[in-house]
C-alpha cells in the first residue's frame, strides 16, 4: 500500500522541514527594541562626554565673571544689558567713565574719559574683561583714551553656574567622571566578587560558611560609613573613590557567583575534570567561571547604574570628586542650592544622570533576558 508523499503511514502530515533552532543570546538581544535603544543612548552619552575634549567651546574650569548665572539660551552674548553692565564694571575698575562707540556688529572703540589726561597703562583693565578684546594700540584724545576693541561673542546653551562657568561643558566633564567611576568601580566589584564567590561556592563546607558570614557582616555596615573610613585612612583621591565603591559593591556579585558555582560544581563536566586530576584552581578558571558568564555579565550591566548613583550620592555629600573636577552629583547639589533662581542648574545635570542610569538599567535587564535560555 502506498501513501502520498506528504503523508506518513499513520496518516499524519509529514513535516515540511526541520524546526528552526532557538535563537541565541546575541540574536535575542538584537531583536529587543529596548536593548537597542538603551545601548544607543549610552553610546551617545559616552560619545558626547568623552568627545567634548575635541569640540567643547569652553574649558571646564574657565570662569567668566561677566556671565554669572546666565540662563540657558542659544543666543550669543553679550546682550545690550550685559554690555552696559560690563562697561560700568570697567569704569569702576579704571575709575573713569567708560563708553563704547560701536562701529560694527563685533567691533568698536572703547573710550575711557576722566578729569585729566588718562594714563595709557589703564588699558590693562581689558585683560580681565570677558566681553571686549583690544585689537590695536590706544590713542590719547585730550582727557580720553580711545582703545579699538572687538566684542567677544560667547554662547552658553545650558547657561552658566554661580561661578560663571559653562554648564554644558561642566555636565560633559562630569559625565566622563561618572561613567569612568561606573566602569572602573564595577570592574573592581567584578574581580573581587567573582573570585570570592567562586572560591566559597566551590570549596564549600566550613570555609564557605565563614566566608559568607564575613559578607553578611560587611553588608550590615553602612555604605557611607565604610567610604568615610577609607577616605580618612588613605586620603581623598579619584582612584580611591573607584576602589572604595568597588570594594563595597562586590558583595552582591559574590553571592550571585557563589550560587552559580554551587549549581555547577556537581555537573558532569566538572566531575569529569576532577576525575582526571585537574587542580581546583584550574577547574574554576577553565570550567566553572566561563559557564556562568551570562548571569555575571547581566548583573554587571545592572551594577553600573548603581555605582554611578553611589558616586553621585557621595559627591552630593561632598565626599566624592573635588574641584576643579566635577561630577553629576556635585552639579545636582549646586543646582539644588540655586533652584529658586536658576532651575537650569538642577534640571540639566539631573536629566543627564537620569538618562544614563535608566539606559544602563534597561540594558542590564535586556542582557538578562537575552541570557535566559528559556
Image (cartoon, rainbow, N blue to C red):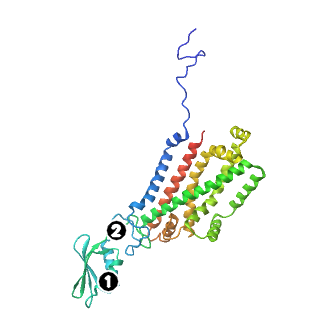
Q: Is residue 337 visible?
A: yes
Q: Where is 341 relative to 303, above or below?
A: below
Residue at 47 percent across and 71 percent down: it is 338
* Residue 89: quadrant of the picture: bottom left
Residue 241 position within the rendered picture, expressed as x and y whole percent measured from the top left: 58, 64
Residue 260 makes an appearance in the image: no
**Camera-side residue of 173 and 240:** 240
Q: Position of residue 369 (x, y in %)?
A: 57, 44
Tell which of 141 and 317 is nearer to you: 141
Distance in Å between CA atoms under marks 1 and 2: 22 Å
Give the residue pinned by disc 1. Answer: 91
Point 31% across, 77% down: residue: 84
* Residue 283 image label: none
Q: Residue at x 66, y 52 (%)?
A: 195
Which of the pair 217/208 is nearer the observer?
Answer: 208
Q: Name the residue under label 2.
A: 154
Q: Is residue 196 above or below residue 74?
A: above
Q: What is the quadrant of the C terminus in the image?
A: top right
User: Going from the N terminus, do you reach mark 1 or mark 2 first?
Assistant: 1
Where residue 20 appears, as percent x and y from the top left, is 54, 30
Q: Residues within 10 Å of mark 2 (few under 14, many from 20)?
A: some
Q: How crowded is mark 1: few (under 14 residues within 10 Å), some or many (20 or more)?
A: some
Q: Is residue 212 above or below residue 155?
A: above
The quadrant where residue 154 appears:
bottom left
Return the residue found at the far bottom. 116
Amino acid at each position: 500500500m502506498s501513501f502520498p508523499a506528504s503523508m506518513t503511514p499513520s496518516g499524519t502530515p509529514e513535516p515540511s522541514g526541520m524546526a528552526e533552532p532557538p535563537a541565541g543570546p546575541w540574536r535575542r538581544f538584537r531583536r529587543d527594541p529596548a536593548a537597542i535603544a538603551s545601548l544607543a543612548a549610552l553610546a551617545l552619552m559616552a560619545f558626547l562626554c568623552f568627545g567634548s575634549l575635541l569640540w567643547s567651546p569652553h574649558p571646564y574650569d574657565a570662569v567668566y565673571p561677566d556671565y554669572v548665572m546666565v540662563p540657558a539660551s542659544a543666543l550669543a552674548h553679550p546682550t545690550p544689558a550685559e554690555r552696559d553692565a560690563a562697561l560700568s564694571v570697567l569704569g569702576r575698575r579704571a575709575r573713569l567713565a567708560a563708553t563704547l562707540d560701536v562701529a560694527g556688529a563685533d567691533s568698536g572703540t572703547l573710550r575711557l574719559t576722566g578729569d585729566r589726561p588718562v594714563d595709557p597703562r589703564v588699558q590693562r583693565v581689558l585683560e580681565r574683561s570677558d566681553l571686549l578684546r583690544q585689537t590695536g594700540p590706544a590713542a590719547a584724545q585730550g582727557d580720553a583714551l580711545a582703545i579699538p576693541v572687538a566684542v567677544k561673542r560667547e554662547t552658553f546653551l545650558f547657561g552658566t553656574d554661580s561661578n560663571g562657568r559653562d554648564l554644558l561643558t561642566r555636565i560633559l566633564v562630569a559625565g566622563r567622571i561618572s561613567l569612568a567611576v561606573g566602569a572602573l568601580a564595577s570592574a573592581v566589584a567584578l574581580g573581587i566578587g567573582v573570585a570570592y564567590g567562586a572560591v566559597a561556592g566551590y570549596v564549600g563546607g566550613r570555609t564557605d560558611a565563614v566566608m559568607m558570614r564575613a559578607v553578611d557582616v560587611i553588608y550590615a555596615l553602612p555604605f557611607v560609613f565604610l567610604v568615610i573610613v577609607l577616605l580618612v585612612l588613605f586620603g581623598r583621591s579619584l582612584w580611591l573613590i573607584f576602589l572604595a565603591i568597588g570594594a563595597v559593591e562586590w558583595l552582591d556579585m559574590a553571592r550571585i557567583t557563589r550560587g552559580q558555582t554551587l549549581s555547577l560544581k556537581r555537573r558532569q563536566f566538572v566531575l569529569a575534570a576532577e576525575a582526571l586530576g585537574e587542580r581546583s584552581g584550574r577547574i574554576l578558571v577553565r570550567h566553572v567561571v566561563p559557564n556562568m558568564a551570562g548571569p555575571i555579565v547581566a548583573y554587571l550591566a545592572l551594577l553600573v547604574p548603581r555605582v554611578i548613583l553611589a558616586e553621585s550620592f557621595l559627591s552630593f555629600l561632598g565626599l566624592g570628586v573635588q574641584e576643579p573636577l566635577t561630577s553629576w552629583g556635585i552639579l545636582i547639589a549646586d543646582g539644588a542650592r540655586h533652584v529658586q533662581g536658576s532651575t537650569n542648574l538642577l534640571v540639566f545635570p539631573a536629566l543627564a544622570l537620569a538618562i544614563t542610569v535608566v539606559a544602563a538599567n534597561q540594558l542590564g535587564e535586556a542582557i538578562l533576558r537575552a541570557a535566559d535560555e528559556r
